[in-house]
Image (spheres, rainbow, N blue to C red):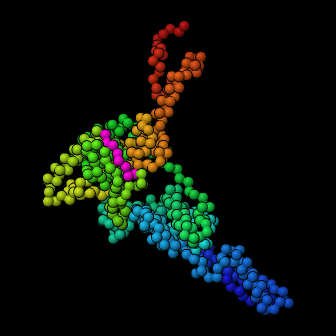
Amino acid sequence: MGTIEKRGKNSWRVGVQVFDLFKGWQWVRKTIRMDPGLSQEKQREKAQEALNILMEEVGANREQPGDLGHTVRTWSDIWMEQHVKPNCSPVTYGNYRFLLDSRILPLLGDVPLVLLTPMKLTEWLNAVRDAPRLSTRLEEEELARPRAPSQKLTTEKQQAKPLSNKTVLHYYTCMESMLSAAVRLEYLDRNPMERVTRPKVRKPKVKVLSEERAVELLRCLADEPNMCYRSAVLLALLCGLRLGEVGELKLSDVDFDKWTIDISRALKYSPRAGNYVAEPKTESSERLISLPMGMMVVLEETKKYQEECQQLVPHLWKGEGWIVHGWDGRQLHHDTPSKWFRKFADAHGFQGVRFHDLRHTHASILLGNNMDVVAVAGRMGHGDPTTTLRVYAHALERRDREAARTLDRLFGDIAMPSRPELQLTRKGQPAADDAPAQDDEAPVK
């Protein structure tokens, strides 16, 4: 908001109101001394010119604060309803809602979009980085189902820890996405977040089981009486399925003649909506997977197991053919197989192994055994094989060692040093078959 004030006989003061990120609306003023020979009308015209220049200098070239267009708060409401809600899952919607309500709107909610600068957004992101943690838990009345009495909640000690770079990146991504939508719909000329340094996050190393440990896990699983849980683990380990894909599979999705399974749905969960069925993670995640014989045997046993369970409680049966189900056939909660597996893994010496690590193990074993990366990407539901290579590059270590051994066979005799004492063996590898055995009792010649 710009003003013109007459301060003396030939003195005028112009001012404009601008928004500071942490101080709110502030006045920027400038006093102008006029030529005494100018009339009052001419002096006012000069003052108006000075005001226009001042407004351009501070970037607030509008007459009223209300004329600056949408604030972050009003635009976030439009963005959430018109873009996020119709195009994103309830999980994504809930995540964005938390990010907005926790640290975006309290700090930036009243700032007009046109006054957001890279510097102000950098200050905001640093404030987010230094802020204490907030609990993400909902109140009981907001939950789709009651919270279990034993459910662990975020403690005060955990809340006192600083935010991780990954969490800060979530805030950055939310703001960047929201302002990009404002640019597309021509509320902004450019996105100021593009000039804000993106938080660096080191991606954690994928955790996998070795082939030997995977075999050991399968042996432990053979004693599990619940065929549903056994099927869930094998679908992840032998087929590379995600937890949500396993939870929504039905026996009708299995072709028992062709030994294939159709992945076209996924079970998902949000605290407010509860369990809900949606499409798999990406378009390429809809796929038809060939099943190994061991998986088919387990699915046949699961089918018989389900029929036996139904005969025991026919009047209570609520099943619709889900492969993983409760005692009465009903569909399990999205997280139940994962929680069961954590207990199973800890009890059998696989501490810290998650259900999703079985999917990682599936891809790593296939790549380590020279399976074509395109075929592995298809089983995993990756649209681009480079994604598979990037995530599971560690699985190529065995193939790299084989490449080194191939070069040894081709050029070893030529490249071998002439001094025998310098001939080495690779750590963990047996010595060459034709190498003479060392005899500690042999006389020195």
Residue drawn at 42 percent across, 42 percent down: 376
Residue drawn at 61 percent across, 72 percent down: 115
Q: Residue 139's spot in the image, x, y percent?
A: 36, 69
Q: Which one is nearer the viewer's eye here, 170 or 348?
A: 170
Which segment is the magenta one?
285-292
Residue drawn at 78 percent across, 88 percent down: 43
Q: Is residue 299 above or below residue 113?
A: above
Q: Residue 162's spot in the image, x, y percent?
A: 51, 59
- The total of numbered circles placed on residues is 0
- Whether the magenta-drawn stretch holds residue 287 is answered as yes
Q: Is residue 48 left or right of residue 320?
A: right
Q: Residue 194's spot in the image, x, y percent?
A: 60, 61
- Whether the magenta-drawn stretch holds residue 328 is answered as no
Whether residue 156 is visible to the viewer of this picture, yes or no, is: no
Q: Residue furthest right?
A: 37
In what quadrant of the picture does the N terminus appear? bottom right
Q: Is residue 114 above or below residue 334?
A: below
Whether residue 254 is visible to the viewer of this picture, yes or no, is: yes
Q: Is residue 307 left or right of residue 439?
A: left
Q: Is residue 344 left or right of residue 65?
A: left
Splitting the image into 4 quarters, where does residue 20 fall? bottom right
Residue drawn at 57 percent across, 67 percent down: 183
Q: Residue furthest front?
A: 258
Q: Is residue 14 left or right of residue 243?
A: right
Splitting the image into 4 quarters, where does residue 24 fall? bottom right
In what quadrant of the picture does the C terminus appear? top right
Q: Residue 77's spot in the image, x, y percent?
A: 48, 73
Q: Which one is nearer the viewer's eye here, 180 or 203?
A: 180
Q: Which one is nearer the viewer's eye here, 20 or 259?
A: 259
